[in-house]
Amino acid sequence: MYWAALLLDKPSDAASLHDDLQGLATWALQWTPRVAIVDEAVVMEVEASLRLFGGKRALRERIRTEGAELGVAVASWASTSLAALAFARAGVENGFARPLTEGLDRLPLEVLSASGPHRPTLARLGCKTLGDVRKLPRGGVSRRFDKELLTALDQAYGLRPEAHAWVELPEQFRARLELMSRVELAAAMMFGVRRLILQMCGWLAARHSGAGGFVLRWAHDAMRSKSAGEGGQLTIRTGEPTRSAEHFSRLLNEHLAKTELLAPVGDLELEAVDVQALEETSGSLLPDTVRQGETLREVLERISARLGPERVLRPVVTEDHRLEWAQCWQPAAEKLPRESSCLDVPQPSWVLPEPLKLATRGPKPMYQGELHLLAGPHRVEGGWWHRVQTPSGQDNRHVQRDYWVALSESAGVLWVFQERLADEDAAWYLHGIFA
């Protein structure tokens, strides 16, 4: 078996230790479903996950790197969970460097929790290491000490099976973190929020899901003015579900730079929202090109967060046959609508801001000479529902037009239309130009 033990930095109190261990265990569920909390550490059995994450060395490196941001002081590896925990307490990372028995025999008694009540007696017997205890007669140890000591020793050395209460994956993600010190600037919260984001992304990976955003809440210090309130919150949204910790962090950085705290903050809470199953990309027999940097959507979302959504727009094709409203502008960070399927008529390359009324010679329109109608009419009618407020009152955008593809010897191929049912006010208009 291949076990990992993750040992945290010492927190200030038991409540903080409980929250930190729960958060670390939730993050660890992305690597394996067999995660347990033992004393002040998190242990996980990763034997079945080695190939999935590229082997022992790659998995150790990923857990060590990401775990450091979550406050993991030591990550140790061994063939049993209690052995991995013992090595972590002793500051030894690789429990496979020498045979398990030889490695454990060198460790002091303090690395095994079951030895705690008996250390003074064992010290008087001259026992300083686990190897010294194992040299004692088993019958005498079982009569003089409780059975937990021998059981723990046998489990650590792999002589007896271990049993753990596995951590279950919660249905919703909501994690809390108490900051090490009170912060007065919103940007300074990022250090703590980063830990919560990593926990959330680990939870999302374990659920094979992505989040459309998250809600960050903070609680003000008890010594605050009454006008400051109990705290505040910030909601971050993405255009599509993701579990990229880097993208979440970049977006939050932009929002925190524009946030002002009304009082010092001591506690943080993060909640995932709009959680959806994330479609995984299929593997390939050939090596794929590794994506470098951010995607276009991520860049637009980050710029929108910095400048404001109303200042970063993108054109979107809409379900409308009327040429003026077949396209609209929407904030770039918003989700794109479904693709339009109503554009079944020729579409010019350029459209005039306002249709230009044309002169006529008899029944034929004129634009830098007489126009020759090539194709048409393409009849468009609609917009009776489109009502707008104008200075003169309410108006609608109902149109009844016959569009033609026309040829001008000087201007090229044009997109013109004639108003339908206009009686004597019938007129021709230039609306677009084909490239």
Image (cartoon, helix red, strand yellow):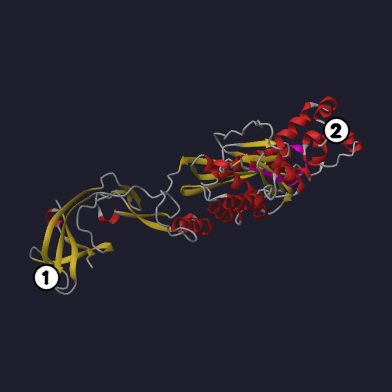
Residue 406, given in percent of the width and then of the height, sits at 14, 65
Q: Is residue 156 left or right of residue 202?
A: right
Q: Looking at the image, which residue sits at the far left?
A: 362
Badge 2 crowding class, 10 Å Cα cut-off, few under 14, some 14 to 19, many 20 or more, is some
Which quadrant of the view contains residue 278? top left
Image point (26%, 56%), residue name:
323
- Three-letter code for the amino acid on which mark 2 is drawn: His
- Label 2 residue SS: helix
**Position above or below: 292 against 411:** above
Nearest to the observer: residue 409 or residue 28:
28
Residue 178 visible, this orientation = no
Q: How many marks?
A: 2
Residue 59, given in percent of the width and then of the height, sits at 58, 50
Which quadrant of the view contains residue 332? bottom left
Badge 1 crowding class, 10 Å Cα cut-off, few under 14, some 14 to 19, many 20 or more, is some
Mark toward the viewer: 2 or 1 = 2
The disc, 2 or 1, on the residue closer to the chain's N-terminal end is 2
Position of the N terminus by quadrant: top right
- What numbered label is drawn on residue 118? 2
Q: Which portion, as a residue range, is magenta?
A: 3-14
Q: Looking at the image, which residue sits at the far right?
A: 124
Q: Is residue 59 left or right of residue 370?
A: right
Residue topped by disc 1: 370
Q: Residue 224 magenta-drawn?
A: no
